[in-house]
Image (cartoon, rainbow, N blue to C red):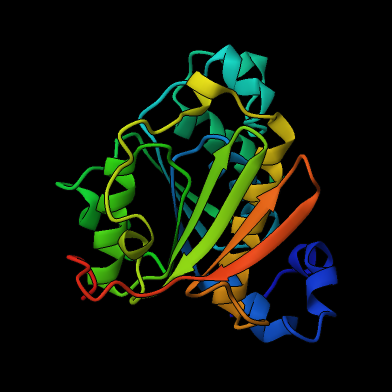
């Protein structure tokens, strides 16, 4: 797989990184990453993956852009209000990097279609705020043996974890909390979405290139108000209905 002169200049800062270099950039170009939800986590993650030269980005979201999204979903602008997110996002990403391919899928991921929607992906990033979708994509990724990067936001704090088989996401969250908070209900500071989305993109890049140590089996918890972060190990649930 060769690079054009434009790509060599574009990815110059990657090509001189010893942990990435030419081979790593080739792996990025050959990879397909699925993004479940093009919202607070998915929008900034998609921008950084496109900028990094991930060859194919599959955008999966059935929602349309709303004015309230623009406080944190930085892949969109005022002119996009009312447009399908995958359509508006595809235009933004193509303008950022014309060397990548975009696969817009205007569907809501559910248990019935999760396996089909992630088929062919090398890594999946889940940035949804719906537990049914989170459980469905987790089960599909475990079955397909595809690494799952999970990012979540909550008011001033966020978390990113990587699940590659066992433990899986459902080991961490066995069931949906009865009073699950959403950004629409409790609010979220906009810049936090950029922090978590960028970290999710970084974990996907590490998984693809083999650079460093991914957060596999671990959860990074970031407290935006305190400016602190900690990483905890996720224990495998011996009774997990998905990965046990």
Q: Nearer the viewer, residue 236 or 191?
A: 236
Residue 241, percent from left and from top: 17, 65
Quadrant for the C terminus, please: bottom left
Q: Nearer the viewer, residue 179 or 211?
A: 179
Residue 25, percent from left and from top: 67, 75
Q: Residue at x 52, y 46 (%)?
A: 152
Q: Residue at x 74, y 43 (%)?
A: 224
Q: Residue at x 70, y 54 (%)?
A: 51
Q: Residue furthest left?
A: 112
Q: Residue at x 63, y 36 (%)?
A: 92
Q: Nearer the viewer, residue 154 or 119?
A: 154
Image side of residue 1 versus residue 140, left or right: right
Is 126 located above or below residue 63 in the figure?
below
Q: Is residue 40 visible?
A: yes
Is 65 located above or below residue 110 in the figure?
above
Residue 38, percent from left and from top: 50, 38
């Amino acid at each position: 797989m060769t690079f054009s002169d434009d790509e060599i200049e574009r990815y110059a800062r990657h090509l001189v990184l010893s942990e990435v270099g030419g081979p790593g950039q080739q792996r990025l170009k050959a990879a397909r990453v699925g993004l479940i939800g093009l919202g607070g986590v998915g929008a900034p993650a998609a921008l950084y993956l496109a900028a990094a030269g991930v060859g194919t980005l599959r955008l999966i979201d059935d929602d349309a852009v709303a004015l309230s999204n623009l406080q944190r979903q930085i892949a969109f602008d005022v002119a996009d209000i009312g447009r399908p997110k995958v359509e508006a996002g595809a235009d933004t990403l193509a303008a950022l990097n014309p060397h990548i391919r975009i696969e817009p899928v205007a569907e809501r991921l559910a248990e019935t279609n999760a396996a089909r929607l992630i088929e062919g992906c090398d890594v999946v990033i889940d940035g949804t705020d719906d537990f049914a979708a989170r459980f469905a994509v987790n089960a599909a990724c475990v079955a397909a043996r595809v690494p799952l990067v999970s990012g979540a936001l909550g008011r001033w704090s966020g978390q990113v974890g990587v699940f590659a088989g066992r433990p899986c996401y459902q080991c961490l969250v066995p069931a949906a909390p009865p009073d699950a908070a959403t950004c629409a209900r409790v609010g979220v500071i906009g810049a936090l979405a950029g922090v978590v989305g960028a970290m999710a993109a970084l974990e996907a890049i590490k998984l693809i290139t083999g650079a460093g140590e991914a957060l596999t089996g671990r959860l990074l918890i970031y407290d935006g108000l305190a400016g602190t972060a900690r990483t905890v190990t996720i224990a495998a649930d011996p009774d997990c209905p998905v990965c046990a």
